[in-house]
Amino acid sequence: MALGRAGNPPLPGLQTARAPAESGAPPGLDDDAVLQAMQAGGGLRLLGLRIVIVLVLLMAAQAYDGSLHALSHWFILALYGLGTVWFGLGERGGGPAAAAYSWAGTGLNAGLAVYVLIEHMLAGGGAGLGADTVSRLPAFLLLLQTGLSMRVAQTLVFCGLVIACWSATFGIGVLHPELFPNADTFPTAQLTGLATFTAAGLLVVDGVIRLRGAVVRARRMEHERTLLARFVPDAVALDLSAEDGDSALGIHRRHACLMMLDIRGFSRLSGEHPPEAMVAALLAVRAAAQAAVAEAGGIVDKYIGNAVLVQFVMGTPDAQARAALVCALSLRRRIAALNAARAAEGLFTLRVVVALHAGDLLVGVFDDGVRAEYTVLGPAMNALSRIEVQAKAAEIELAASGDFLALLGDALPDGIRAAPVPRAVLPEGLTLFAVADRDPDPAGSAFASGATPAASAAA
C-alpha cells in the first residue's frame, strides 16, 4: 500500500519580531527579576559573608603582616571593613541607589585586593609560600564574594581590574627587577599566582553565567507550565514547557497527530428538531468524544460548532498515531452505544465522520494580548480540514491521510483495513484512505448511520 509522505508543506519559521512593548516575554524574566529571585532571602547571608571575609583578612594580617607600613595597612583594612558593611547595608536596603552601592562595593573589593597584592610585591613578593598565600587570600576571597552577588558584569569588572593591575605590576617587576626584592623568585611566584587567579576568575564567571541561565530557564518553564496548565493536562504542560520553544512567543515546534470529528447533516437536523434536542445531542457527542480522547491520552483542542478538534502531541510520532487510531475506534464504539440508547428512547440517531492526519505544527498558547488560546497551527491543520471535507463527500466514516497511516506501518489493528480513495481532491502529495472493518456489517455500521436499522428508521 503506497502511502504518501509529502503531503505537508514545510512549516514556516516563527515570526518573532515584535515591538518591544509586545515582545510577549513572560513577566518576571527581566534581568532585575532574575537577580532578585537568585538573591531572595540571601541578603543577610551576603552581609554576613562580608563580615566573615573582613575577619579572615584581619586574622591573616595578624599572622603575617608583610606591609611596608604596618599602621597604614591596618588602617586600610579597618576602612575596608566599615566600607564594605556600609555598602552591603545600602545594597540590601534596595531602591534606586542599590545598584550604585553594589558597584561601589565591587570597586572597594577590587581596590583592597590590588592594594594587598602590590604592597606585598613591593615588600618582597615571592619571599615565601606563607607570605604569598596571605597576600593573595583577599583577591580570591573577594572574587568569591563578588561572584556570589550573581552579577556577571561586576564579577567581570572585579576580575579585570585585579588581573590588569597585577599584570601591570608584574610587567614592571620584570622590566625593572631592582624595584622589587627577591628578583630571582619574583617572576615565577607572581606568574603562578596570576595564572591561578585568572583561572579561578574564569571559573567563577562561567559558574555565575550558567547559574543565571539555569534560573532564567527554570522561571520560564514554570511560567509556561502555569500558563499551559490552564488549558491542557499537567503532563502535557510539563512536557511542552520542558523543551526549548520560541523565547518570545512561548510556542513550540512539535509533531502531532490530529483528529477531527464532525456530525453529518447537523444543519438539516437542526431544521427538523427543536434547539433543545439539538443541544442535548451535541453535548452527548462531545461527552463521548471527551471520554474517548481522555482514555487515549489526547487533548480536545476545541469545539467548533458541531465539530471536535483533537490533538495528540505526547510521545513519538508513531505512538501518537497509535493513540489517535485507538481513540477513533473507541469513539466509533461510543457513538454506536449512544445511538442505540437514543434509538431505544425514540430519539433521532447521529452520523459522524472522523478524519485523521499527522504533521509538524506550532503548539502552544497563542496570546494576542486580549485573549489567550491553546491550539496548534500549521499546514497540517489546513490539510486536516480538506481531508474531512473529502471524507464527507466520499461517504467515508473514518478517513486517514497517507502521512498518518505511514506512521503506523503495518501495525493496523486486527480486522481493520485501509483502502485508498483514488478520486479524493487534495493538495499535491496528500493521499486519502478509508479505514474500516475488513468484513463490514452494513446493519452494524453505527459510526455513520446509527446503531441498527430500527434506529435509522426511528430517525
Image: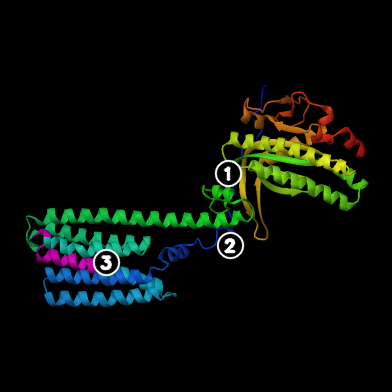
Which is more foreground, mark 2 or mark 1? 1
Residue 150: image location, x then y, percent: 37, 62
Depth check: give the residue in front, 161 or 66: 66
The answer for how far apart the CA atoms under marks 3 and 1 are is 47 Å
Is label 2 in a helix, a strand or a loop?
A: helix
Dot 3 or dot 1: first in sequence order is 3
- Which three-letter amino acid code belongs to the residue tagged 3? Ala
The answer for how far apart the CA atoms under marks 2 and 1 are is 25 Å
For residue 328, which numbered disc appears in the image?
none
Is label 1 in a helix, a strand or a loop?
A: strand
- Which three-letter amino acid code belongs to the residue tagged 2? Ala
Tell me the quarter of the picture where residue 64 sits.
bottom left
Instruction: Name which residue lies at 18% across and 64% down.
Output: 117
According to the image, label 3 marks what residue? 110
Determine whether 127 is above or below 48 in the image.
above
Q: Could you classify mark 2 by the number of other residues whose Cα lies within 10 Å: few (under 14), some (14-19), or many (20 or more)? A: few
Q: Main secondary structure of the magenta part?
A: helix
Q: Is residue 386 visible?
A: no
Q: Is residue 118 magenta?
A: yes
Residue 4: image location, x then y, percent: 66, 27
Region in magenta: 111-129
Tell me which colouring the rendered structure shows. rainbow
Q: Is residue 227 magenta?
A: no
According to the image, label 1 marks what residue? 253
According to the image, label 2 marks what residue? 21
